[in-house]
Each structure stands twice: as C-alpha cells, then as structure tokens.
Amino acid sequence: MCCEPKGHHGGYKPLKSALSLECGCNCGHSFRNYLTVKEKQDILEEYKNQLREELKAVDEHLQDLKG
C-alpha cells in the first residue's frame, strides 16, 4: 500500500517491491508483513504479464526506429 495517490506508478511494481507489499516509491508504507502463497503467485503472474508487455513495447519501439 502506498501513501501516494492511487495510480501514481502507472500500474508497474518492481518485483522486489511487489513481493514485499511496498509500492516501489520507497515510501516504506505497508501494514502487512506476510503474503499468502496465492498472493505471491498472483503477484508473480502479474509481474510476468508486465514483463511481456514491456518486451512488446520495446520491440515496437525498435521497429519504429528501424523505419
């Protein structure tokens, strides 16, 4: 959970932050210390999807640069 307004990260959470329930902005705000196995799985699946989308965007950008 983050102390910043909702959505200020654009949906992206670095894996380390996601698994520790931090928002990634280094505010350190969290009320929980542990994740369930299901929560960890869900976070990892979302992270994998974010990486796929990032790779797609990089490929598109490279195609644009090549003309």
Image (spheres, grey):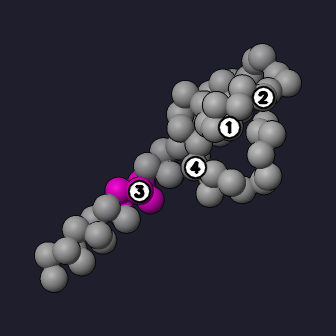
Q: Earlier in the sequence, mark 2 or mark 3?
A: 2
Judged from the image, the secondary structure of the residue bearing numbered disc 2 is loop
Predominant secondary structure in magenta? helix
Residue shown at 27%/65% (left/top)?
Answer: 59
Q: Label 3 amino acid?
A: Glu
Residue labelled with disc 2: 29
**Neighbours of disc 4 within 10 Å: few (<14), some (14-19), many (20+):** some
> What residue span does the magenta drawing correspond to?
52-56
Q: CB atoms at circles 3 and 4 under 8 Å apart?
A: no
Q: Is residue 49 visible?
A: yes
Q: Earlier in the sequence, mark 1 or mark 2?
A: 1
Q: Earlier in the sequence, mark 3 or mark 4?
A: 4
| Mark 1 and mark 3: Cα distance apart in space | 19 Å
Judged from the image, the secondary structure of the residue bearing numbered disc 3 is helix
Residue shown at 80%/40% (left/top)?
Answer: 3
The dot on residue 54 is 3
Which label sits in the foreground, 1 or 3?
1
- Front position in the image: 34 or 23: 23
Q: Label 1 amino acid?
A: Cys
In the image, is 30 to the left or to the right of 65?
A: right
Q: CB atoms at circles 4 and 1 under 8 Å apart?
A: no
| Mark 4 and mark 2: Cα distance apart in space | 17 Å
Q: CB atoms at circles 1 and 2 under 8 Å apart?
A: yes
Q: Label 4 amino acid?
A: Tyr
Q: Earlier in the sequence, mark 1 or mark 3?
A: 1
